[in-house]
Image (spheres, grey):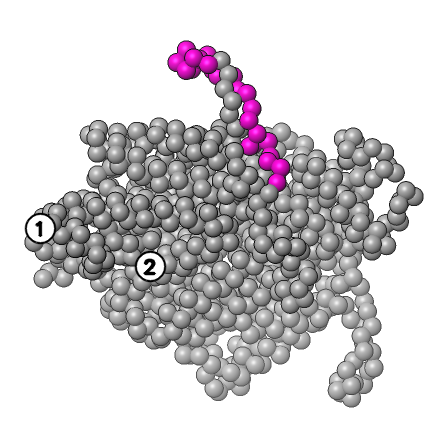
Amino acid sequence: NLQESESENKLDGETASDSESKSEFGGSPPVPTSDDTPEVLNRALSNLSSRWKNWWVRGILTLAMITFFFIIIYLGPMVLMTIVMCVQIKCFHEIITIGYNVYHSYDLPWFRTLSWYFLLCVNYFFYGETVTDYFFTLVQREEPLRILSKYHRFISFALYLTGFCMFVLSLVKKHYRLQFYMFGWTHVTLLIVVTQSHLIIHNLFEGMIWFIVPISCVICNDIMAYMFGFFFGRTPLIKLSPKKTWEGFIGGFFATVLFGLLLSYVMSGYRCFTCPVEFNNDSNSFTVDCEPSELFQLQEYNIPLVLQSVVGWKTVRMYPFQIHSIALSTFASLIGPFGGFFASGFKRAFKIKDFANTIPGHGGIMDRFDCQYLMATFVNVYIASFIRGPNPSKLIQQFLTLRPDQQLHIFNTLKAHLVDKGMLGSLEDA
Amino acid sequence: EVYLEERLGELDLRSDSDVPDVPPPTDSTPEILKRALSGLSARWKNWWIRGILTLAMISVFFLIIYLGSFMLMLLVLSIQVKCYHEIITIGYRVYHSYDLPWFRSLSWYFLLCVNYFFYGETVADYFATFVQRREQLQFLIRYHRFISFALYLTGFCMFVLSLVKKHYRLQFYMFAWTHVTLLITVTQSHLVIQNLFEGMIWFLVPISSVICNDITAYIFGFFFGRTPLIKLSPKKTWEGFIGGFFSTVVFGFIFSYFLAQHQYFVCPVEYNSETNRFVTECEPSELFQMKKYSVPPLLQAVLGWETVNMYPFQMHSIALSTFASLIGPFGGFFASGFKRAFKIKDFADTIPGHGGIMDRFDCQYLMATFVHVYITSFIRGPNPSKLLKQLLILQPEQQLSVYKTLKSHLVEKGILQPSLRG
């Protein structure tokens, strides 16, 4: 994130050799990162001093990433899903590569193959569950897909077990420890990277707004905290990240909440953002078309007396979703940074400056996404707890696998319930 | 350049032979046994101790089964906590990290969080009627995931705040060690409990098959063992492996035959809210009703029968025993590799002659997951009362549309007669 790399860059720019950088253990050189900046940028900025050059490179790349973000939103859910998947694979690769560097374990037999194999297995498991849930009718139609989905868990488990047995068979006498370390490293990485990328996709399917608002809040908090810190920063926040300040933290918090409110207001007006993503069997494509739920219909709210004098209105028209956005922004500003501190601690522990150098001036993909991970899980838990009920098509799917007597029992109970509520006119009208 | 202890990767790059051995576990054999066996040579003494302890463990097992499901659940929970403790203690020794600030509290805290999450889900599913009656529990169940997540996050933030300048690496290692251990021990102990609720037979047959495989593979290896099986465990032989496989399948087959006759073992465990107890009473499902099977012509010649009366469950037991004999041992090899990697002879010395609890349960873990996946894939459909509960919390419009879909499905299948109005 912004403040971290800025301080490190300053150090590199001003001292003679990389190996002089502060480290708590002393003596060992950090992993060198090559300069990835494209030639064209290098030439254009060759006149400026190295510090301003760095600023410009970061700025340009930031704009490039944001533009890219907008483009893929425009292209739709399928492309977004693919992008999430690519980001996930790249993050996994980055973290595993760090593991290799730490343990000098390039030569371990089979290990690279096994890591990628486990990644494939876990992804197969999660994507299979998603596909079964959301593309139920498509799956039922195609015979091979139907069998794959019926025995999905068993197949995934069998695939995983194969990898596990391969690991056991690949244990080599002098390298047991290294191999167990890498095994542990791989599994923890899978836990972090893959599960959370799938939570992001679930959020996306709930409605693009649940994907865009959280991610934007984290990015906004990053930028705002940096700016507030730059202009007003005085009191350090935490020893792990010396450049972070309380002023930046609090300023970023308020700015992000405000930003979230405004962004939600703008987005709630459009169906393409608020409707759950569904797969249309007839056109074989994704559609986002629906009757907007209550969350996205304007309502009158009474302004609390305290604010009435400040703002001058008695009531305000807002979307209920905006209230939820306050919760999301709050989490992004207060807890999201802990994901960043965790990543900073990790980088210090393993003496690396950045996770990789994929993005010039910014480091690796993981560096950009470290705060997003906690956010994705939070949004998913939030939706499951406060917003969404169970998925009706999934329930129907489960119903169809029950025994006839169980089906009848449930049907009659449901019928009685609906009659009770007055939803069904009379017993014959059903 | 000064090569400090903590140089990048140095701590971990020392070849296995450089790692100082963990001090050998102390001998915890009770005094009585020692005196009784003082006459015998060391080797036979070891045999006797192992034998006595094996019998003791099996007796405890039978006792607990007799005492019922609730006691079994408690037993599983205790074993899980002990295994977790054993593995974490090994981590402390490997990294000399007894003094890391907060770390012990954090490990136990995470164990508590993850258990809270899993037990909460189980309680919500199986004790629905019990929960409905109490207001506070209702609140906890409804927001269960959120509460669990908040608890976990608190632990996570505490970890970040506890990072201390000179110990970052150690702390990250212990954090990862804790999480992998949780993944292994806690999730699988919960799968064991889910299997138990499906019917005690799904708990007993797999565990017994693994134990039987252990014992019979050892016996076959002792008498006929010649070809080594795998470098990791030099004592294991192919003869033991194959002999153990066939014996375990036969054992599983016969054992299931006996268990399948009793409702106590075969019925899903349910909680009776009136008597506030667990009951195992039901109409035995098809799996546990005798059927006639035609013996394949090959075996007809051998056995001399044309048909045989079996429980369908016995066919499933063949699958379970096969897994226990062929794949279960990989769990054991994994644990052997782990012990060699970290230079320990046993996980702990809780059980004299046998080592720690983990030593006894290393093969069981893969088995528990397999049985659970097997049940959900091939045996059990979804839980009807859970499905009903979810249907009832849908939005009214959704309920109506689901109702219409279900109705048309039932009419189509002939389960429901079409209404007079068509």
Disc 1 to disc 2: CB gap under 8 Å: no
Q: Nearer the viewer, residue B217 or B177?
A: B177
Residue occupying the point 43% across, 30% down: A261
Quarter of the N terminus of chain A within the rendering: top left
The amino acid type found where label 1 is placed reads: Thr
Residue occupying the point 24% across, 33% down: A229
Quarter of the C terminus of chain A within the rendering: top right
- Characterize the local packing of mark 1: few (<14), some (14-19) or many (20 or more) Cα atoms within 10 angstroms: few
Question: In the orientation shown, which residue stands out farthest toward the left?
Answer: A16
Residue occupying the point 21% across, 28% down: A232
Q: Circle 1 sits in a helix, a strand or a loop, which is it?
A: loop
Q: Nearer the viewer, residue B134 or A170?
A: A170
Q: Is residue A362 visible?
A: yes
The amino acid type found where label 2 is placed reads: Glu
Q: Tell which subunit mark 1 falls on.
A: A
Q: Is residue A85 above or below residue A70?
A: below
In the rendered image, which residue does mark 1 sit on? A15
Marks 1 and 2 share the same chain? yes
Assess whether residue A292 is covered by the magenta stretch.
Answer: yes
Residue A132, percent from left and from top: 61, 56
Q: Is residue A309 above or below residue B22?
A: above
Q: Is residue B199 visible?
A: no
Residue occupying the point 30% across, 65% down: A100
Label annotation for residue B132? none
Residue A315, percent from left and from top: 51, 16
The CA span between labels 1 and 2 is: 28 Å
Label annotation for residue A94? 2
Chain part drawn in magenta: A290-313
Q: Is residue A430 left or right of residue B115?
A: right
